[in-house]
Image: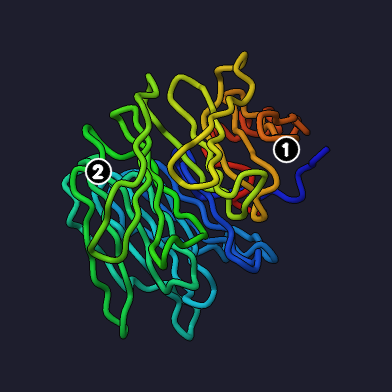
Amino acid sequence: MLSIASSFETIHKGQILSTDIDYYNKYVCTSSADGVIQITDSENPDLYSVVQLQEHVGPVWQVMFSHPKFGFLASCGTDCKLIIRKTNNEGDWKVAYQYDGHKSSTTSIDWAPYKCGAIIACSSADGCISIHTLNNNEWSVSKIPNAHSNGVNCISWSNELLNSNLLLVSGGNDNKIKIWEGQIGFWNVMYESDNQLSTIKDISWSPTPGLYKHVFASCASNGRVFVWGSDDYRDWVQTEIDPENLQKQKISFSRFGTVLSVTMNSYAVQLWKQIDKQTWMCMDRSISDKKTFDRQNKNINQDIFAAI
């Protein structure tokens, strides 16, 4: 059974929407509906030493550290912006790049595999996905227009390349999942799912192959979670996780892809491990402390593997 290793107070005055921990498990970053991003040193979680970032206006949906090779911290929010920061010699986080070309809320971000360089994707409620690339200390942007009608909610990069091309999976309000193949500026849909009967609100590509060569998981607004497996990127087999329980809201694979975490509406987190191609076994569902969350009056909408 997993247990809480440590906990600390935040300065947030609104719901915590996202968390992330850097590669070395030193900094814990949280974003909130109050528009504030907080960075806490896990070795010294004193409220007097936390860093507050307030470049966003309105709720910040997600924060995410890049690979330490680049040292960036990215965020997106309801103000339609993608903001990327980097620390200076004094340890201050300064804005290195800001993009405000989306016409509606920026909903999700994900860094591409570091071996491909500093590349980040950003999805938006305007239906587009923007791809931002750092070359020679200059950021450039390309777009996947009309990626999903009525808005894109979630994105996730594959760690694998196909014929030297990047692969990105996305989910949207059109109830569909799409896999995009391409290079910077040139993107094609290589797979499009049937209507999933509900909005796709979270998606996670497994960082390593499993019993199938390629695996990702999706979570829909109706509480259904599917694991998708394929050996050729085109024919996908779906396996539903715990179809009797429709209280699921967020998913994430562990760093090595061997365990899938499923965050529930009841504050609990279920851990699932694959037994064979069609069977997943629940390992543990007693992770969160509901009383602690209730006492703090803060609902953390984040998966357990932000820190693993």
Q: Nearer the viewer, residue 128 or 53?
A: 128
Mark closest to the chain's N terminus, 1 or 2: 2
Binning the other alpha carbons within 10 Å of mark 1 as few (below 14), some (14 to 19) or many (20 upward) gives some
Residue ID for mark 1: 273
Residue 51 drawn at (x, y percent): 49, 64
Q: Residue at x 57, y 43 (%)?
A: 252
| 223, above or below 54, in the image | above
Residue 31 drawn at (x, y percent): 45, 49
The alpha-carbon separation of the residues under discs 1 and 2 comes to 32 Å
Q: Quadrant of residue 293?
A: top right
Residue ID for mark 2: 147
Q: Is 182 placed left or right of 223 in the picture?
A: left
Q: Nearer the viewer, residue 212 or 3?
A: 212
Of the 4 image quadrants, the one containing the N terminus is top right
Residue 227 drawn at (x, y percent): 56, 34
Q: Is residue 101 visible?
A: yes
| 102, above or below 159, in the image | above
Q: Is 235 placed left or right of 94 in the picture?
A: right
Q: Residue at x 37, y 32 (%)?
A: 193
Of the 4 image quadrants, the one containing the C terminus is bottom right
Q: Nearer the viewer, residue 224 or 96?
A: 224
| 189, above or below 44, in the image | above
Q: Quadrant of residue 303?
A: top right
Q: Say if mark 1 contacts mark 2, CB within 8 Å.
A: no
Q: Amino acid at mark 2?
A: Ala
Q: Nearer the viewer, residue 86 or 214?
A: 214
| 119, above or below 28, in the image | below
Q: Amino acid at mark 1?
A: Lys
Provide the secondary structure element on which disc 1 rests.
strand
